[in-house]
Amino acid sequence: TGISTPTWSPPDGRRYRIRTRSVDTARNISTESTRIFYFDSLLPDTLIQHPPNNNPVTTLATISGTSSDTSMLDGSGNTIQKTEIRVYFIDANNYWSPDDNDWVAEDTWYVAPSTVSDLTVWFSTGINWFANYRYRIEARAFDKAGNYDIDWSTRTVIYDPITPESYISIPKEGVYYSTIDRITGTAYDAGSG
């Protein structure tokens, strides 16, 4: 048994091969052992593209975004393993759980499905949103070396699917006027926006 602990600072995003063999005092030489491994300490990046940040939105059918990793380990320029999402219901102090299909008290991250084989484009659907409440959406990517971005992509939104109403008071419908000094009415929005 042997252990080698050299001081080594390899460049990121490269593939390495280690070859070893042993020789005993009688000069017998072992079969060579080879290992290929990848070194990557670079953090991936995640971006939530929908919904926009700090805006009321009328639809939240889909959360979507992208993940990327600058490592060139596999030749594709991307080594994303998965992207996780956490959806926090701010006003209720709960998290969305796809396993329970409900809002739960436990802090819950879940893996977002992807639309492409390299997992760089992802989405989430099926969340049971409640109108006129605030939500925080966070996403983080993991690469094949186990690194994940520590500056998560975050969006805070208010879900407001309720259409506002308006009513014209003056002029009256079907009435003839020789002069009109003002036009008046009311507007009402039960939603947040």
Image (tube, rainbow, N blue to C red):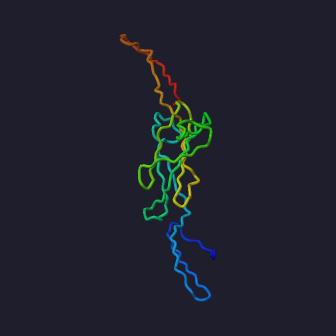
Where residue 109 appears, x then y in whole percent?
56, 46
Residue 124 is situated, as x and y percent measured from the top left of the image, at 48, 43
Q: Please determine whether, in this image, residue 101 is positioned above or below residue 185.
A: below
Q: Quadrant of residue 87?
A: top right
Q: Is residue 170 above or below residue 85?
A: above
Q: Give how far across and how far down residue 95 sits, in percent.
A: 58, 39
Q: Residue at x 41, y 52 (%)?
A: 116
Nearest the eye: 149 or 99: 99
- Picture layout, residue 101 above or below residue 47: above
Number of dots carrying numbers: 0
Q: Nearer the viewer, residue 46 or 106?
A: 106
User: Residue at the spot x=52%, y=42% of the render?
Assistant: 53
- Image point (45%, 53%), residue name: 120
Q: Nearer the viewer, residue 23 or 47?
A: 23
Q: Nearer the viewer, residue 32 or 17?
A: 32
Q: Is residue 73 left or right of residue 1?
A: left
Quadrant showing the N terminus: bottom right
- Residue 39 percent coordinates (x, y): 54, 67
Residue furthest to the bottom in view is 26
Q: Quadrant of residue 5?
A: bottom right
Vertical side of 191 occupied by 68: above or below: below
Residue pictured at 51% horizontal, 37% vertical: 55
